[in-house]
Image: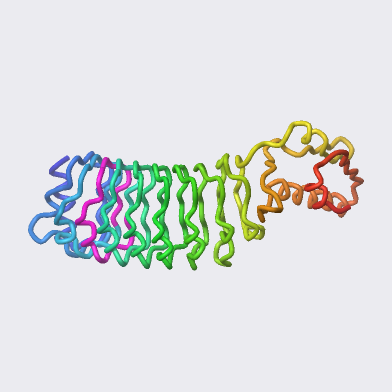
Amino acid sequence: MASELCKTISVARLEKHKNLFLNYRNLHHFPLELLKDEGLQYLERLYMKRNSLTTLPENLAQKLPNLVELYLHSNNIVVVPEAIGSLVKLQCLDLSDNALEIVCPEIGRLRALRHLRLANNQLQFLPPEVGDLKELQTLDISTNRLLTLPERLHLCLSLQYLTVDRNRLWCVPRHLCQLPSLNELSMAGNRLAFLPLDLGRSRELQYVYVDNNIHLKGLPSYLYNKVVGCSGCGAPIQVSEVKLLSFSSGQLTVFLPAEVKAIGTENDRVLPLQELAMRSLHHTYHTFLKGGQQLVLWLTAAPPSVCRHLTY
């Protein structure tokens, strides 16, 4: 195995390969052959997924100075070392599924970085220097232990996709609403109780996912025209209300589903999820009418906040 590895690296050096694949090699240490002599000066993409690496060498940037993409998915790396900041041409860094506890501040020196993936680790915080990544477009920090996000994150002016699912967030910094390029924000499975009222004000933001935040009481009104995922939020409405609200046509009877949540009030300036559900029922009602089918809508004791959103 070792001789085969050395041969692979030697061929890459002699033929000046730009891509090197060292996935599934059961490597416990960074190969010395990669760091030998002048290293691999022409290498741009290094794939070392699903090994058993625990550290990265301090002279990585010196030996691989033109590295653009580094894939270290599924290893056992605990710390992102200071040396990572010297890979000045790096555009993509994947450290998902490791054992990361610390990301060094020097990561902010990766000014060319566009994609940073740190999902499935043990991070409790991100250094504020992440805000120095002006070219960053994708940031995936899902399935960690984050309690909050760095306020300087709003300085990532190119950020388009932010994924923070399955952490321990209890609030969202209002500064995130200022991200001018953000198109998709996913914060499912956290501990959010509220969202900034400005969230969704940006025209660029089109997709927001906050599913399974059981304490979330409402959605900002700016999210009305966005694609929103919010299942598993808020408190379930009473069973009696569910049974009293239905519409039927022939053998078809549709009840207000139990997973619909009654959250938010007009005073909160939020759009209740109950309203979103009723708009869907209203659309279905008119679809039946256009199809020439006879549809009877029974509303015997629905909450007033629901009835206002149905016209017939």
Q: Is residue 226 left or right of residue 303?
A: left
Please name the residue shown 32% across and 54% down the image. 127
Closer to the camera, 1 or 285? 285
Whole-percent x, y for residue 76 in the image: 26, 40
Q: Is residue 300 left or right of residue 64?
A: right
Closer to the camera, 196 or 80? 196
- What scheme was used to colour the molecule? rainbow
Closer to the camera, 150 or 96? 150
Q: Is residue 144 left or right of residue 49?
A: right
Tell me where the magenta segment starts and ends, as one range: 70-93
Check residue 189 for magenta coloring: no
Quadrant into which the N terminus falls = top left
Residue furthest to the left: 37
Whole-percent x, y for residue 292 in the image: 90, 51
Residue 2 vs 309, above or below: the answer is above
Residue furthest to the top: 239
- Number of disc labels: 0
Whole-percent x, y for residue 303 in the image: 80, 43
Asked where in the image residue 77 lies, by quadrant, the reply is top left
Residue 43 vs 23, above or below: the answer is below
Please name the residue shown 49% across and 49% down the image. 171
Please name the residue shown 17% across and 43% down the image. 29
Closer to the camera, 32 or 56? 56
Whole-percent x, y for residue 178 in the image: 49, 65
Please name the residue shown 82% across and 41% down the image. 302
